[in-house]
Image (cartoon, helix red, strand yellow):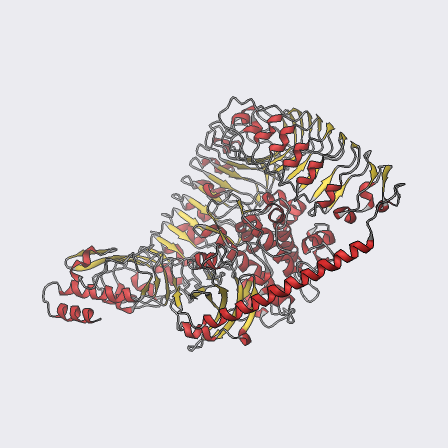
Amino acid sequence: MVLFVFVFFSLLTTSSSSSLANDALVLTSLKQGFEFVDPVLQTWDVSNPGSVCSWVGIQCSRDRVTVLDISDMNLRGYVSKDITKLDGLVSLSLSGNNFTGEIELSNLSNLKFLNISQNNFTGGLDWDYSSLSELESFDANDNNFTAPLPLGVLKLVKNLKYLELGGNFFHGKIPSSYGSLINLEYLSLAANDLDGRIPGELGNLINLKELYLGYYSTFEGGIPKELGNLVNLVHLDMAMCGLDGSIPNDLGNLKYLHTLYLFGNRLTGSIPSRLGNLTSLVNLDLSNNALVGEIPAEFTNFQKLSLLNLNLNRLHGSIPDFVAGFTFLETLQLFMNNFTGVIPEKLGQNGRLQLLDLSTNKLTGTIPQYLCSSNQLQKLILFKNFLFGSIPEKLGVCTSLVKVRIGQNYLNGSIPNGFLYLPELNIVELQNNMLSGNLLENSGETSTKPVKLSQLNLSNNLLSGSLPSSISNFSSLQILLLSGNEFSGPIPVSIGNLRQILKLDLSGNAFSEELPPEIGKCSHLSYLDLSQNNFSGPIPSEISNIRILNYLNLSRNHLTHEIPKSIGSMKSLTGADFSFNDFMGKLPENGQFSYFDASAFAGNPRLCGSLLNNPCNVTTVMGKPEKVSRDLKLILALAFLICSLVFAVAAVVKAKSFKKVCSDKWKMTTFTKVGFSVADVLECMKDSNVIGRGGAGIVYVGKMPNGEEIAVKRLLGFANHSHDHGFGAEIQTLGNIRHRNIVRLLAFCSNSTTNLLVYEYMRNGSLGEALHGKKGGILGWDLRYKISIEAALGLCYLHFDCSPLILHRDVKSNNILLDSNFEAHVADFGLAKFLVDSGVSECMSAIAGSYGYIAPEYAYTLKVDEKSDVYSFGVVLLELITGRKPVGEFGDGVDIVQWAKRTTNCKKEMVINILDPRLSKIPMSEAMHLFFTALLCVQENSVERPTMREVVQMLSEFPRHSPSNSSTSSSSSTSSSSTSKFFQKQQEQELKKMGKEGKEMEFHKLPPVPDLLI
């Protein structure tokens, strides 16, 4: 401090370079408000102010600091008002940090470029812009500003060219006066909470090149025709913001337009033919609306088009041949319309096509020959049409293919040679066609192997011959469905090399000979169906090595001998069928056999046992009951004695640890500016303040001296152990997370034995308590739907926007917390793991999660990816719909997923049978949609589940009713206004089309540019 004062007075008495010295002092003052400054700002050394121009992020000109750029340095803290003293600044960038609090800039008369994006600034932007008169570029994207849009920026009319206010919580209407900012070339108000009409005055911004208004906002009315005056516009994005009405013809005036995104609205009418005037168009997405009519003939002018998405509308007619002539076409998605006729014969001849989805239409004819003419095609999706003919032979050498879904057509002929062994293939679905011929062996002539194929569905065709032994090359295969064909011969012993297989269905064929013992090596199998074949001989005892098998069907074969007793030890086996074989001898009664119904063994006349009401003529040898009884009593007595000793020792250790907690030195690390000390935190830790207990610790609530309420999670220190009960994971993940729907970590405190996590306090507790506690009726329907979207947004952020990506691993209603406004926040990352390589499953060392929420593949295989979180979230959705707990209310061995599916027969229209009786005035269309989304999330096959990004899209884009205040709680009125903030898109008519076929939909991520499509 003495050094600082000395330098300060020295600088004041120095006449030369005084302005630069003052700038150095200001920067040093700024640094004092920053946190985590070392080592990134180590060069900002107050003892050497003369070196200021060489400090990191600093540039000088004419003895003044003119550039301050500390972007992406992961700094925290606040920005002092002293920053306004740097009046020589021309460029200021604070972006990509974690600054909090309000920020106000003024008196920077030379400032031209200002970037404060990607922080946590709050408040508004109502500044004195007259003192920022030279500002040309202003970027405030991705903060937490909550106010009306600033009117002060109108004072920048002379110079302002770039204005980015998106990704915040600005509310209210777009000021019509924004139309006077005539020098603007870029304007983004996207992803806010705006409403009202889009002012036609924006059409006065004739210099505008990019305009972004979509996402989250809910505008009234349609697209202003005045936007057709923006003749210099290159990019127009008005997606998912509640627009209705027709597309104005005037948009056809935008001759320089490169990208037009209007997807996810409620637009009606036909596609204007005048859009054909947009000859510079590269990306056109009008999907997920209610457009009717045909594709305009004028679209033939789109010679630069790369992306054309018209899916999820009500379009009809044929696909014009000129589409095949688009030289640069990479993505064509027309799925879920009513298109008829044939697919253009020359489609793909341009050599650029990467994604083609024409599924769920009424197309006929054959699959074009040139779809993969230059090995660019990655996804071919044509299911649910009326296509016939053979699969083009050229697809057998299309090495770029990743996903092929052409089931439910009338395709015939054989599968092209080499097709199933393509190196990049991940999913192949050819089911429900009339394909014939044999599956050929992998020739081995290629240098690559099909190591990426995870799902192969050839069921319900006319395929014959034996299974090739090269099936073992599918080393990543998880699902193999071959049912309903004419395969014959034995199962090759190489089947045992499918070590990742989860589901194997060979039913309804003509397989014969004995079951290979090698099938027992498929240790991850949870579903095995070999029914309706000609298998003979005994059941190999090795099958009991599959410790996680959940379903086994061997019915309607010619199997003989006794059923192995070892099957009874397969505790995961909950469903089995051994009926109509030639089994003999006594049916085992041990283990799982006692749970199977007698019908599972019907049609085996030589099988006997008490379970079959067919007693065996065999004398059962019993042990001496007296000896057994004595031994049992002795074992129980010893067990009780040991448990008592363990508890006594634990009590002593715990007492000593508590005494030591208060004596050890504490250290507190904060992640934001806080108004409390370690002592204040420790004062909270009283038994009377306990509000919860979890797998990672005890949670206390406390009120700080400044009135702020906090939640403190206490975890015992595990410094000398490899397992820290989630502490390390929580610190690593929560410390860098910034999202409205993620619970915020304020600080953590620790000493040698104890770790404390300090969170913002959620006044309304957990969703689980709100649904299942004593006040379980407080959540009305609108509030429940809103919570579902907010929780989905939080999980989506973890899965897609964190770096590295994060897997929660314990999603449940008790880990979704509600603040004072009943806004949902995802909490408890004690089980979180980083997904270092997104898309690649991670094998954990132990099962983590909560009973009733664990996905099937997780519980049985310990193999998890983000789809495990999706399953758990689906269970939470069922809780919201039914008001029931995941387990404990449906009988032994039945959880909420099984109960809901059984009660509704997996039909969304039957959701009325499971709705929470405490709810009233439920919009049935919303209930059906929420249930439909839940069913997609809890599908047994993880591959078929949507991603959390797709879940967000499905929930938030559904055209909801106008929420009223008629919910069962006063808080529901809060949800009414909040719910209206979410964008609307998908029409109920389209959802009716989806029905039970929803699991076959191809979901698409946002934004809809080709390289982000799944």
Q: Nearer the viewer, residue 697 or 574?
A: 697
Occupied quadrant, residue 51: bottom left
Image vertical order of residue 445 relative to residue 483, above or below? above
Occupied quadrant, residue 58: bottom left
Judge left or right: residue 7 versus residue 261: left
Judge left or right: residue 587 versus residue 180: right
For the question of whether residue 704 can be seen, the reply is yes
The residue located at (32%, 64%) in the rendering is 34
Image vertical order of residue 73 relative to residue 379, above or below? below
Counting from the top left corner in percent of width and height, residue 351 is at 46, 29
Q: Nearer the viewer, residue 137 or 302?
A: 137
The mark tally for this picture is 0
Q: Nearer the viewer, residue 244 or 842?
A: 842
Judge left or right: residue 627 versus residue 233: right
Counting from the top left corner in percent of width and height, residue 842 is at 52, 45
Counting from the top left corner in percent of width and height, residue 329 is at 46, 35
Image vertical order of residue 687 relative to residue 41, above or below? below
Counting from the top left corner in percent of width and height, residue 820 is at 52, 71
For the question of whether residue 884 can be seen, the reply is no
Q: Residue furthest left?
A: 15
Q: Nearer the viewer, residue 394 or 697?
A: 697
For the N terminus, the image quarter is bottom left
